[in-house]
Amino acid sequence: MHVLHVVGARPNFMKAAPVIRALHQRSQVRQSLVHTGQHYDANMSDVFFAQLEMPAPDVNLEVGSGSHARQTAEIMTRIEPVLLETKPDVVLVYGDVNSTLAAVLVCSKLLIQVGHVEAGLRSFDATMPEEINRIVTDRLANVLFTPSVDGDENLLRENVEPGKIHRVGNVMIDSLIRLLPSAMQCPQNGLPERYALVTLHRPSNVDDPATLKNILASLLKVSEQLEVVFPVHPRTRQRIGEMGSDAKGLHLLDPLPYIEFLALQRRAKVVVTDSGGIQEETTYLGVPCLTLRSNTERPVTVTAGTNTLVGSDNKKLHSELIRILEGKGKSGTIPPLWDGHAGERIAEILCQLPVNPNESGTPNLAVV
Ligand code: UD1
C-alpha cells in the first residue's frame, strides 16, 4: 500500500510525524511525503522536520505565499502531476490549512482516496479561512480521523456516513508526549523565571492595524504584572513593522523550533494565544490558556481543559490573568485518547482499507 502524506504549513508537521512513524512499522506500507512549500522559512519548516525526525520530503512544490486563491490554485496545479505519476493508494491530509484543502480537491477528482487527520473540528465561524478548509475537506475525504467526540458529532450532524468516522485521539499530542522530555532539558536562555507566553497570527487579529494596536497595548498592560515572551509569526512581524508600532517592553523573539517552544509553554504561568493547536497543547500540559478569539473549533479545551475564550475583551483578559496569578486558573483534565498513541490507531485503520476501492472507476482526467 502506498500512502502519500501532504504537508505544507507549520502546524501540519507535528501532526504528520507520529503517523509517518507508526506507518513505518508496517512492512506492507510504502510512504512518500509531499511538502507544498506553503511555509518555507527555515524556522517555520526545516527545523520542525529535524526535531520531529521526519524524512525529507520526496517532493517540494515550493508554492510560497500568496492570496488564498492563488496559493490554493498553485498547490492544486503543482500536486496533480505528482499524484498522477506516483499513483498513491491513499493520500493523508492534516488539519485545516490551504495545503489540506488544495490536496483533497485534486485527489477527489482523480478518484484517489483521502484520509483527513484532525477531522470534524468546527468553529462555526465562516469568516475564518480555516473553517472553509475544514468543511470542504471533510465533505470530500473518504476516511475521517477525529481527535475528540465533538468532531464525531459535528460530522454526523452534517450527514457524514458513520462508517467513515474514526475517533483516534489527538496526533499532535503524540508529538508532544514524545518530545516533552527533550523540552524539559532546554536551558532557560536568559528568559524571565515567570512569564506569560504570547502567540498571535490570525488575520482577524493582526491584519487590521487598529485591532493589532489594541492587542499590543493590552499585552503591554499584561507586562506590568508578568513579563511577556512573544515569538512572533512572520505575518505578525510584517504587520507590526508596517504599523511602526512600539512593542518595547515585550520580549519579541523569532519563531521558535518545536522543542524550544514546547519548553516555553510548559514553564509559562499563562499562555495568551489565537492559535488552534496551542489551545490543545496547554490543555495537555495543564497550563492556563487565554484565547484571543470569540470561538474555538476545539471546545473540549474549554469544557475539559485549561482554555478560556477572552475574545477581544481586554477587561476579561486582565481579570482572567489576575485569577491565574492568584492561583485560581483552570487546572483542567486531559481529554480521552490524547495519550500518545493516535498515530498508531490511524496506522491500524489505514492498513485495513481496501487498497484500490476505485478499481472500477477511472480517474477523472477529462480536460474541460
Ligand atoms: C497558516 C494557516 C493557519 C495556521 C498558520 C500557522 C491557512 C489558511 N492558514 O497561516 O491555519 O494556523 O499557518 O502558522 O493555511 N510567511 C513567511 N514565511 C513562511 C510562511 C509565511 O514569511 O515560511 C509570511 C508571508 O508573508 C505570508 C504570511 O506569512 O504571506 C502568511 O502565511 P500563510 O501560509 O499564507 O498563512 P499563515 O498566516 O502562516
Image (cartoon, rainbow, N blue to C red):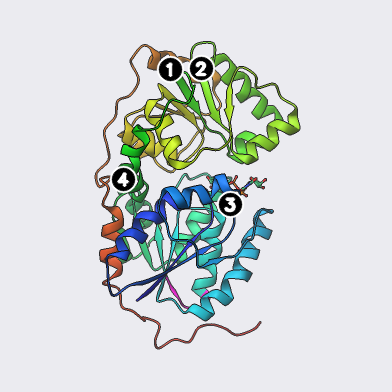
Which tag, 4 or 1, sits closer to the chain's start? 4
Amino acid on which the number 1 mark rests in the picture: Arg
Q: Nearer the viewer, residue 128 or 96?
A: 96
- Image location (x, y in percent) of residue 116: 41, 61
Residue under circle 1? 194
* CB at disc 3 and ligand 1 closer than 8 Å: yes
Which tag, 2 or 1, sits closer to the chain's start? 1
Which tag, 3 or 2, sits closer to the chain's start? 3
- Image location (x, y in percent) of residue 273: 50, 32
Residue under circle 4? 178
Residue under circle 2? 227
Q: Does 111 appear in magenta? A: yes
**Residue 126 appears in the rendering:** no
Q: Are marks 4 and 1 in contact (CB under 8 Å)?
A: no
The secondary structure making up most of the magenta span is: loop
Amino acid on which the number 4 mark rests in the picture: Arg
| Mark identifier at residue 39 | 3
